[in-house]
């Protein structure tokens, strides 16, 4: 069965194609070849070897997955690869892999020859529900995450949960952080649904496809209203719930120390605690309770995700110990975050589960306290 959801952006509108089947790679490439386009792939090497072994005729630059590949060096290599192989403006680039591959390939496509078309083929849960949709592309630099990039919408996003069959368990869990995020910021019914599941979501869970589609629907609605995150309040920035904290963690700990979804999981818990502080301060409209924080914490922990800086479940060189992070270093990273407005840190907080807002007048002392409670020093 093939279903379709459209991201409505006027002349830049595009479909998200949901499909099933064991030969997902064959389906995707056949669909793209039917366009008559000359295409090149930028792919996660492991994913390519597992799902696209019979497509040696397709020009492909294979890279390692992980945040280390989301760099200026890999960006330069990819552009040189396209130029060396004489890819013209009427060519296309296919991103095959997780969020790192999609972000990198999208930025390459936006930049090479001042813009060529690209297609998203997300193969991780995180990329399916979040990074493949919406046109945010970019790379990391030493100063911070995603500080260099462009808005460049894909032509099509192809989603098949069959790709998740070979996804490592910790990567699936990392994707669940973004799924839970959508319930916390936009859809209380989705949050309730996740809580009520008798069995945890897995790649072959009968409800996973519907959950993935719902996350894509939410993101499409938000992106349609605020494509380039220019709204003075709310808008696309709401998708950053927990991310101001998460990006600081990734930057200070070192990219790859935490999976992005692990850092987001911690950030979601801290954003929930920030929301309670806003209630305690008497901020109008906020009604998040300690019980709500416990619910968020429990759902995140259910998917074996870290909830503070003392816990790192992502195996790094066989070591499960979390790195010690400095409050000052974390605050410094936050001040360099692209969400800063007029020198003020900008956070997303919940008025209640299922409804988030942006806030930019948070006392620094609160953030210091929240970092301290989370295990920063």
Image (spheres, rainbow, N blue to C red):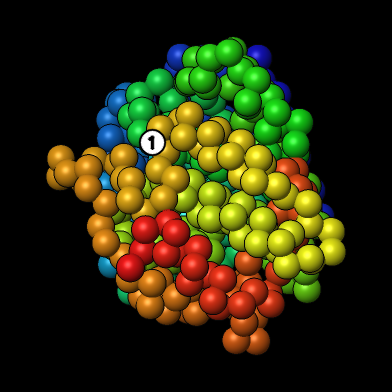
Residue 91 visible, this angle: no
Relative to 136, residue 155 above or below: above
Q: Tell me the quadrant of the picture where the C terminus can be found.
A: bottom left
* Vertical order, 226 against 66 (above or below): below
Residue in the foreground of this view, choosing between 374 and 247: 374
Residue in the foreground of this view, choosing between 91 and 351:
351
Residue 113: where, in percent of width, then height?
49, 69
The residue tagged 1 is: 171
Residue 16 location in percent, x, y?
Answer: 66, 37
Is 156 placed above or below 198 here? Answer: below
x and y, in percent, of residue 365 in the image: 54, 76
Q: Position of 93 compared to 283: left or right?
A: left
Q: Quadrant of residue 157?
A: top right
Q: Give the residue displayed 84% in from the left and 64% down from the top.
A: 284
Q: Label 1: how many residues lie within 10 Å, few (<14), some (14-19) or many (20+)?
A: some
Element assignment for label 1: helix
What residue sits 40% from the left and 43% below the top? 306
Question: Which one is nearer the viewer's eye here, 34 or 145?
Answer: 145
């Amino acid at each position: 069965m093939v279903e379709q959801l459209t991201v409505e952006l006027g002349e830049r509108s595009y479909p998200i194609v949901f499909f099933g089947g064991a030969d997902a790679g064959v389906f995707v490439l056949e669909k793209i070849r039917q366009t008559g386009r000359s295409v090149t792939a930028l792919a996660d090497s492991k994913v390519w070897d597992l799902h696209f072994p019979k497509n040696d005729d397709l020009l492909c630059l294979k890279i390692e997955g992980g945040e280390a590949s989301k760099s200026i060096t890999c960006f330069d290599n990819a552009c040189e690869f396209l130029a060396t192989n004489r890819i013209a403006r009427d060519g296309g680039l296919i991103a095959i892999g997780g969020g790192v591959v999609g972000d990198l390939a999208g930025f390459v496509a936006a930049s090479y020859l001042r813009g060529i078309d690209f297609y998203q083929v997300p193969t991780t849960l995180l990329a399916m529900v979040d990074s493949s949709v919406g046109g945010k592309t970019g790379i990391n630099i030493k100063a911070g995450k995603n500080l260099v990039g462009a808005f460049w919408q894909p032509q099509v996003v192809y989603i098949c949960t069959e790709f998740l069959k070979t996804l490592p368990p910790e990567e699936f869990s990392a994707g669940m952080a973004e799924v839970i995020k959508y319930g916390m910021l936009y859809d209380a019914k989705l949050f309730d649904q996740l809580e009520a599941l008798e069995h945890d979501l897995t790649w072959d869970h009968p409800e996973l496809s519907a959950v993935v589609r719902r996350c894509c629907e939410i993101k499409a609605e938000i992106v349609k209203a605020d494509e380039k995150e220019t709204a003075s309040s709310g808008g696309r920035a709401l998708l950053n719930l927990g991310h101001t904290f998460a990006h600081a963690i990734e930057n200070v700990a070192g990219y790859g120390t935490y999976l992005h979804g692990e850092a987001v999981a911690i950030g979601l818990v801290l954003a929930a605690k920030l929301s309670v502080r806003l209630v305690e301060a008497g901020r109008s409209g906020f009604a998040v309770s300690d019980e709500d924080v416990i619910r968020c914490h429990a759902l995140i922990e259910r998917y074996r995700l870290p909830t503070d800086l003392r816990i790192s479940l992502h195996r790094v060189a066989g070591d499960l110990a979390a790195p010690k992070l400095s409050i000052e270093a974390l605050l410094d990273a936050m001040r360099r975050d692209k969400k800063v407005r007029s020198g003020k840190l900008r956070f997303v907080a919940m008025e209640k589960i299922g409804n988030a807002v942006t806030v930019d007048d948070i006392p620094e002392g609160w953030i210091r306290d929240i970092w301290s409670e989370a295990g920063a020093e």
